[in-house]
Image (cartoon, rainbow, N blue to C red):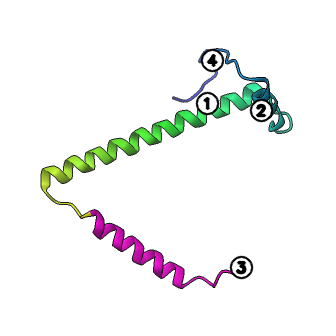
Amino acid sequence: MKYTALMKTASLPPVRVAPELRRDLESVLQQGETLSQLVECAVRSVVEQRRHHAEFVRRGLASIQDAQRTGSSIPAETVLAGLEARLETARAGLPARRS
């Protein structure tokens, strides 16, 4: 949902934190940023992350159901072997690491 000027805002409940965490939070504020802005940004990020995670799980479960329904799937060992081969190919193309 997009925020518009017509929408009323709401407050989040106050959160009690240890004084050390409050100091840590205040120490990472960017110039001109308020603690409330940081908290709002963090909450938005977590909400978005959880939405993405829920969608990832939903798609994974749908894929499992589809594989069970159709009987068409690729064994994990085959997938892992392919990934290992791609990794080795990529590593072979990189310059040697210096110690």
SS at mark 2? helix
Location of mark 1 (residue)? 43
Q: Secondary structure at mark 4?
A: loop
Specify the amino acid type for callout 3: Ser
57 in the magenta segment:
no
Q: Tell me if mark 4 has few (under 14), some (14-19) or many (20+) residues whose alpha carbon lies within 10 angstroms of its own.
A: few
Q: Which of the image's four quarters has the C terminus? A: bottom right
Secondary element under disc 1, as helix, strand or loop, is helix
**Labelled disc at residue 99:** 3
Q: Which mark is residue 25?
A: 2
Residue 41, image x and y in percent?
66, 33
**Which is more N-terminal, label 1 or label 3?**
1
Kind of residue sitting beneath label 2 = Leu
* Residue 87 on the magenta span: yes
Task: Pick whichever, 32 or 17, lies toward us.
Answer: 17
Q: How busy is the neighbourhood of tag 3: few (under 14 within 10 Å), some, or many (20 plus)?
A: few
Farthest left residue? 70
Give the residues in magenta: 76-99
